[in-house]
Amino acid sequence: MVQQHAWVEDSLQQNFALQNRESHILLDCQKLKPIRERIIHRQLGKHLHWFRTTFEVVNAMKDALIAHRALNEKAGILHRDISPTHVRIEHGEGVLVDWDDDYADTKGWPKGVSEDLPARVGTKEFMSKSLLSKRSELLQPELIDTLESFFHTLGWLGLVWGDHKLDTLEITMQIMRQYYIRPESPLRWVNKLYSSLPPGPFWRLVFELGRAVSIRYMVDQVSDDLLLVHILQRTPPKPSEMKEWRDSEWMVERFTKAANALSLIEVPTARVQRYLIVRPDREVLWFYI
């Protein structure tokens, strides 16, 4: 004779009741007609290549810088892939998107979900010289690399669409030489760019950021670029300049100052329509169609 405990009987009754409930739910579902649902996403604004005025692009980059600074200070996050397609213009303001390659900086912050990504991550045209020149085992993502990407993004936009004296052939050669033939030396084009730009807030912004990047490599002693001599020989860097470019606040202030100055200009400099074709490694890049 097998004795069945009360708790076993209760368990069997509960399982039977659950099975009956599931059967009723299944029958009810079979009576319903299938419904197809769609989720439609609206594209957020436009990327920086389609800016209309110099103020619009500088102001959008300022907003993206402020957003990146806040996230870095609160959570230690580095974007690591700043480019014209990842800073978008939405209703006159800037939005920083595409955080797939972000990284949690190692300053006591918790690691991010993308901590296993390689250190050399980003769009090559806008990556820092340090990331492109160092060996992979020596790489460590830093805030200053992301800040330098903001500078290269601004310079790229100024080179391709800016109101300067360079013709289409010169621009194409600069892009090929700078970003595809010698990508490890992204400072050389700055001299020719800001020497061709008309004086004004944008020219001043490019000059100040170019000087800051030059000081970085002069301090780190990882560059023999002749541009360092050109920029720094007349006005040697001050002790304060040796540190300020490592902080987002300095760059935010420069972009804010330039945006405010451009907003006061009655006829802001417009985006110059150009048609460029660049063929690196048989790949055609269409910058304007």
Image (cartoon, rainbow, N blue to C red):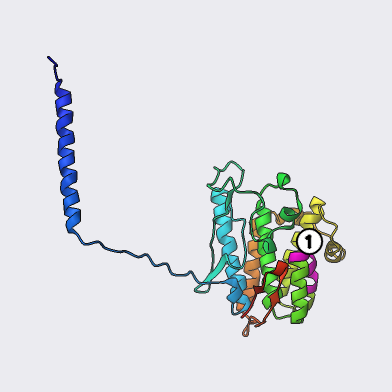
In the image, residue 269 lies in the stretch drawn in magenta = no
Residue 125 located left or right of residue 87: right
Residue 193 located left or right of residue 233: left
Under circle 1, the secondary element is loop
Give the amino acid at mark 1. Answer: Ser
The answer to whether residue 198 shows anywhere in this view is no
> Dividing the image into 4 quarters, which one contains the N terminus?
top left
Up-down relation of residue 286 to residue 126 (above or below) = below
Which residue range is magenta in the image?
180-194
Pointer 1: what residue?
Answer: 185
Residue 229: quarter of image = bottom right
In the image, residue 193 lies in the stretch drawn in magenta = yes
The spot of residue 32 in percent (x, y) is: 19, 59
The spot of residue 167 in percent (x, y) is: 76, 82
Crowding at dot 1, Cα within 10 Å, few <14 / some 14-19 / many 20+, comes out as: some
Residue 32 located left or right of residue 182: left
The spot of residue 208 in percent (x, y) is: 74, 66
The answer to whether residue 52 shows anywhere in this view is yes
Residue 129 located left or right of residue 44: right
Residue lying furthest front in this view?
1
Q: Nearer the viewer, residue 142 or 252?
A: 142
Residue lying furthest bottom in this view?
267
